[in-house]
Image (cartoon, helix red, strand yellow):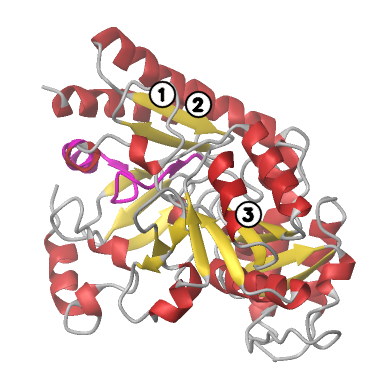
């Protein structure tokens, strides 16, 4: 593959941005080499600056559930942008998107639009603290909730401990308001509540953890987590920035038929534009300013162009059997790869839920916490990724990130991609 233009652009960008990028994983550090600079996307494909065409399973890290350059979204953006890009005032587009979401999602009664998933989580945590009058938050190791100070923490020693900063610039005092628990361990959760009685404002979790592998949890764990939190008068926040509108219109909350107290969204509801949201019951949301005392604001929140893009996307998601078709297509795609690795005897398991998938370099039937991820996964993925790029398949450049199937990926194209992935595994394990 010729990468000369991308390499030149990366050399230039390194003069402007830390590491040459505006988000760390884009730098290709875990897969070596320099990143591809993408110039175009259409349907299931992307093209880089050198004209290389690739089948895209990154889908901009999840938002593009309809594929690149969807006609309905494009038209909505162009039409709305003709009237101006931002006003810092209410617009009809906010009402349209909110109505489409709330009319078809019984898990929330009111919501607030923001500009990113990170902002949604930050606001949800503040709301939980304001509502309960408590300070401490429980999060789970292996779940990522954006670069929020209080949640940029990792576990200390022991089963369930105060968090320690996992990023420079996060004061230890902030980190100590967050307690990190192991995933899929209800006893640890009960012990935390016993030790910090009446101090826990909320438990936050990705109900489908998808930022550190695809660590699919049992419904019973999530069900009991909610029960334990509520017994202790704490709220439960589902971070559905990835799973929301991806595994179903109501996300994981709907898929598992569970009722968290606050849900955060992002990615898909923007149709490719920067949008996030958090929602809850009308009672809990009444604590948000200007109704309540929990302050949160944003100049570009509810931006009309982003709202129009999201509305165009959401209308497509409401088509009959949309999610059933996506899940079936993804399962068939994953099945081809899984059949190959079993035939070859490779220690590989491909996990999938809805239209999300992840290749685990282990034969374990379940991988439900980060400690269960094979220690050589990064090394294996690097070999695999190199082959895939050379043969026209694009994954996010990290073995811990999940892949996404869009509506634009046809069955035939998925079969073709699956064969390339199978060959990449043959090379990886040669």
Query: Can the viewer see residue 249?
Result: no
In percent of width and height, residue 58 lies at 41, 49
Q: Quadrant of residue 310?
A: bottom right
In percent of width and height, residue 285 lies at 82, 72
Residue beneath the point at 73% across and 62% down: 311
Mark 2 vs mark 3: give the one in front: 3
Q: Residue furthest top?
A: 343
Which residue matches tag 1? 415
85 w.r.t. 349: above or below: below
User: Which type of secondary structure does the marked residue at label 1 adopt?
Assistant: helix
Q: CA distance from mark 2 to mark 3?
A: 51 Å
Q: Are marks 1 and 2 in contact (CB under 8 Å)?
A: yes
Residue in the foreground of this view, choosing between 383 and 144: 144
Residue in the foreground of this view, choosing between 302 and 429: 429
Task: Decide whether residue 8 is among the magenta residues.
Answer: no
Task: Decide whether residue 397 is among the magenta residues.
Answer: yes
Q: How many marks?
A: 3
- With 286 as the anchor, is 269 left or right in this view? left
Q: The magenta stretch spans which residues?
A: 380-405
Query: Can the viewer see residue 25?
Result: yes
Which residue matches tag 3? 194
Within 10 angstroms of label 1, few (less than 14), some, or many (20 or more) residues? some
User: Which type of secondary structure does the marked residue at label 3 adopt?
Assistant: helix
- With 334 as the anchor, is 205 left or right in this view? right
In percent of width and height, residue 388 lies at 24, 38
């Amino acid at each position: 593959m010729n990468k000369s233009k991308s390499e030149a652009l990366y050399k230039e960008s390194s003069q402007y941005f830390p590491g040459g990028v505006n988000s760390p994983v884009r730098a290709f550090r875990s897969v070596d080499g320099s990143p591809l600079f993408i110039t175009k996307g259409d349907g299931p494909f992307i093209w880089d600056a050198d004209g290389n065409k690739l089948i895209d399973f990154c889908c901009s890290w999840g938002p593009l559930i309809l594929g690149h350059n969807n006609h309905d979204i494009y038209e909505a953006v162009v039409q709305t942008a003709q009237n101006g890009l931002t006003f810092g005032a209410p617009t009809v587009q906010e009402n349209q998107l909110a109505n489409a979401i709330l009319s078809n999602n019984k898990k929330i009664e009111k919501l607030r639009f923001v500009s990113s998933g990170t902002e949604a989580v930050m606001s949800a945590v503040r709301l939980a603290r304001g509502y309960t009058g408590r300070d401490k938050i429980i999060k789970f190791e292996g779940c990522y909730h954006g670069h929020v100070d209080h949640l940029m923490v990792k576990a200390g020693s022991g089963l369930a401990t105060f968090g320690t900063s996992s990023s420079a610039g996060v004061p230890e005092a902030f980190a100590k308001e967050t307690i990190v628990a192991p995933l899929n361990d209800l006893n640890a959760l009960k012990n935390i509540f016993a030790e910090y009685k009446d101090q826990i404002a909320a438990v936050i979790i990705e109900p489908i953890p998808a930022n550190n592998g695809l660590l699919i949890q049992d419904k019973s764990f999530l069900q009991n987590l909610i029960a334990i939190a509520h017994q202790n008068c704490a709220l439960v926040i589902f971070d559905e920035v990835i799973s929301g509108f991806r595994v179903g219109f109501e996300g994981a909350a709907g898929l598992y038929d569970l009722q968290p107290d606050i849900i955060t969204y992002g990615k898909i509801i923007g149709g490719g534009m920067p949008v996030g949201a958090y929602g809850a019951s009308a009672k809990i949301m009444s604590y948000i300013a200007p109704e309540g005392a929990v302050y949160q604001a944003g100049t570009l929140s509810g931006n009309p162009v982003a709202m129009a893009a999201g509305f165009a996307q959401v209308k497509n998601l409401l088509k009959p059997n949309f999610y059933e078709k996506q899940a079936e297509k993804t399962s068939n795609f994953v099945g081809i790869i899984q059949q190959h690795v079993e035939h070859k005897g490779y220690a590989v398991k491909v996990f999938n839920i809805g239209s999300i998938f992840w290749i685990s370099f282990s034969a374990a039937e379940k991988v439900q916490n980060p400690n269960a991820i094979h220690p050589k996964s990064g090394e294996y993925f690097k070999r695999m990724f190199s082959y895939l790029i050379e043969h026209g398949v694009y994954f996010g450049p990290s073995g811990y990130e999940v892949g996404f199937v869009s509506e634009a990926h046809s069955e035939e194209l998925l079969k073709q991609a699956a064969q390339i992935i199978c060959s990449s595994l043959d090379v990886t394990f040669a």
